[in-house]
Amino acid sequence: MISFQEQEKIFHLQGNTYSYILCVKDGMLMHMYWGKKLPSADIGCLFALHGEGASFDSAFSRAPMEVFTQEKGYYGQRAINLVNPAGDDLLSLRYKGHRIFAGKKALTGLPSSYIEDETEAETLEIDLRDAFTGVVVTLSYTVFRDFDVLARSMVILNKGDAPLTLTDAQTAVHLPRAEYEIIHLKGAWARERHMQRIPMTQGNFSIKSRRGASGHENNPFIALVSPSTTEFSGDVFAMTHVYSGSFSASVEVGIDSAPTMMMGLCSDVFSWKLEPGCSFQAPEALLTYAPDGLNGLSHRMHPFIRKRICRGVWRDRPRPVLINNWEATYFDFTADKLFDIAKRGADIGCELFVMDDGWFGKRNTDNCSLGDWVVNEEKLPGGLKALADRITSLGIMMGLWVEPEMFSPDSDLYRAHPDWCLHVEGRERTQARQQLILDLSRKEVQDYIIGSISAVLRSASISYVKWDMNRNMMEGFSAALPAERKMETQHRYMLGLYRVLSEITSAFPEVLFESCSGGGGRFDCGILCYMPQTWTSDDTDASERVRIQYGTSLIYPASSMGAHVSAVPNHQTGRTTPFHTRCNVAMGGNFGFELDLNKLSPEDLACAKQAVDTVKKLRAVMQQGEYSRLIDPAKQNGRSAWQYTHQNQVVVCIYQDYNVPNMSIWYVKLTGLEESAVYEDREHGIRTTGAALMNIGLPCGLAHQDHESWVYCFEKL
Ligand code: GLA
């Protein structure tokens, strides 16, 4: 998988469908190729064509350095920026040595992709050194046997004798010179991860989060695609960050139209003092090349995230159908009210009841008590144990909402430790949702969270936790850090959070953790390393959710997306959609309810029960199957379709936003079927070949209302 040609000093990293090639030339590590798999790395003779400079520009302004730094007239974006005590930031990294070994190392302090045994991956580590500062950069590349994803990371070690300041640490890559379009996932609260596609032009395009979380606005993912790329064909080059904090991702096209792409920490809110002898571990980035379109990208990323990012006992278990009381009651509940909701859920086959916000301290509205993780016995007499015992007696599991990274100014915790919040002395502590952020860069704060949340989880039979985080950083600085280290706060916060999550999830391995941040404000591969599912969005309106889930699916598998049926008119949009469509859309992820089933009409309740039965029958297909997008809701007038294929089963979900009078039938063409095999959907009386389903398609369009939807289930005979 990884070979080194001693004579030409060429490294060839080979996945099943991609090649990534580097070489050492005049002591410099140069990028030669990333793209379709090559049989050998015998391309040194072609490489001479690269790197020629002319007139105003030095050879370095075009040199495809593997790590972009400021030296000898390289004017492009920089992967590493290190300011040395002389005040300049020049860095001339030269090859010192390398190692190729079986397996993959874990990253110190940060989440990363992993392996289960050493034979399934190979890693290349390359050391580069700057003679002037003594800095050694170790680049790490892991090629997986079973997954077409290249994992990259780097460690920056100060082997000199003076402190340095690191202001940029990015994973960077050159792309073949060509025309491209940029794809990224943009959004906002309740409108997360809509696919955006724009032309790439000369200049620099970047997306960022400075919020202290990956955020609703931009997801830590970026791709360059050939302009002709569709869901089914065309070149895709993508990068995804295994990190949950502020980030930046950028594409730059310089003088000779060869683009560079980078993903890493956001330098606007980051710098790091690197003392002699100390090292800095940069987060991992995942590089994915797909020659077969956007579905090709998803087909590589979904199994990788399911199996080599997500971990723990819930990784492969069918995810429980849940019922959550948030939109049913908000803060206004009693133990009996919750029990009634859970009971009706259990009656129709739900497997987990989740008690959302409002069970602790004196929290009857969102202005108090975060941080005081003690049950409110006025609301829940007998405490968590009494309620959990009642719920579990229904034969279902009990789950709980927490928001451990926050505290309310009106809380015992804040009164005892006002300095525990992120803040700057003398400045206002700006509140959002009437809460402040705990300073997770401090060990004592981390320990408080680990202790208090563990005590809650030990106090009753709790099988599930919804770990929420409902505001972003404003005065995002630690009072415990000296002035010259204040800019380290955001990254230190993330290291602290990862320590907390690692301790708690390993102490409670049987608990299913779902992350949340005002819906999908922290949906990334970093958080998925600890919690295998994320609440996709606070927006549960079926029409909006089609777009949100469609965009999210570009990178993230269905098993990582929480998707619930809620009441109408929808609480976020005021829109009314048919009950069966709300169910069909929620089947696109980990299915659940976010309403009081006791308030449903008998028809809707029957539909809810049928949906639960269908989910249980089909969840292996939907949670583990290969997912393909068929029709993009943004392109075809609100029509949309996706397909899951797993072993002999094929499930197709189709949505049509608005009914159009006097419409002709339209067809949804399936994908990836066996041409000559016969597929049957008994319920709809369809029995035909894979070739017919892929070339003619399923006839649709006879809707009698807006927001119509259909689900087809085929068996390969
Ligand atoms: C956030 C979550 C919601 C709910 C509330 C509770 O907004 O996204 O699902 O849990 O917090 O306060």
Image: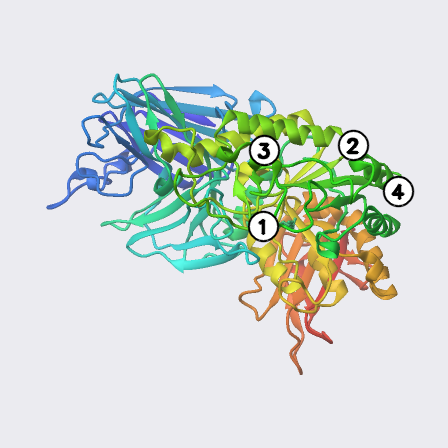
**Picture quadrant of residue 74:** top left
Viewer-nearest of discs 4 and 2: 2
Viewer-nearest of discs 4 and 3: 4
Please tell me which of labels 1 and 3 falls first in the chain: 3
Query: Do the residues under discs 4 and 2 have CB atoms within 8 angstroms?
Result: no
Give the answer, above or below, for where 118 lies relative to 347. Answer: above
Q: CA distance from mark 1 to mark 3?
A: 26 Å
Q: Nearer the viewer, residue 229 or 438?
A: 438
Viewer-nearest of discs 1 and 3: 1
Q: Nearer the viewer, residue 649 or 115?
A: 115
What residue sits right under mark 3 in the picture?
A: 308
Residue 625: x %, y % from top left: 68, 45
What residue sits right under mark 1 in the picture?
A: 518
Helix, strand, or loop for circle 3? helix
What residue sits right under mark 2 in the picture?
A: 460
Viewer-nearest of discs 2 and 3: 2
Q: Is residue 329 left or right of residue 286?
A: right
Q: CA distance from mark 4 to mark 3?
A: 35 Å
Q: Is residue 702 left or right of residue 102?
A: right
Q: Residues within 10 Å of mark 2 (few under 14, many from 20)?
A: some
Please tell me which of labels 2 and 3 falls first in the chain: 3
What residue sits right under mark 4 in the picture?
A: 394
Residue 702: x %, y % from top left: 72, 75
Query: Do the residues under discs 4 and 1 have CB atoms within 8 angstroms?
Result: no
- Which residue is located at x 67 percent, y 75 percent? 665
Viewer-nearest of discs 1 and 2: 2
- Amino acid beneath label 2: Ala
Please tell me which of labels 4 and 1 falls first in the chain: 4
Give the answer, above or below, for where 446 lies relative to 701. Answer: above
Q: Residues within 10 Å of mark 4 (few under 14, many from 20)?
A: some
Residue 618: x %, y % from top left: 77, 49
Label 1 near ligand 1 (CB < 8 Å): yes
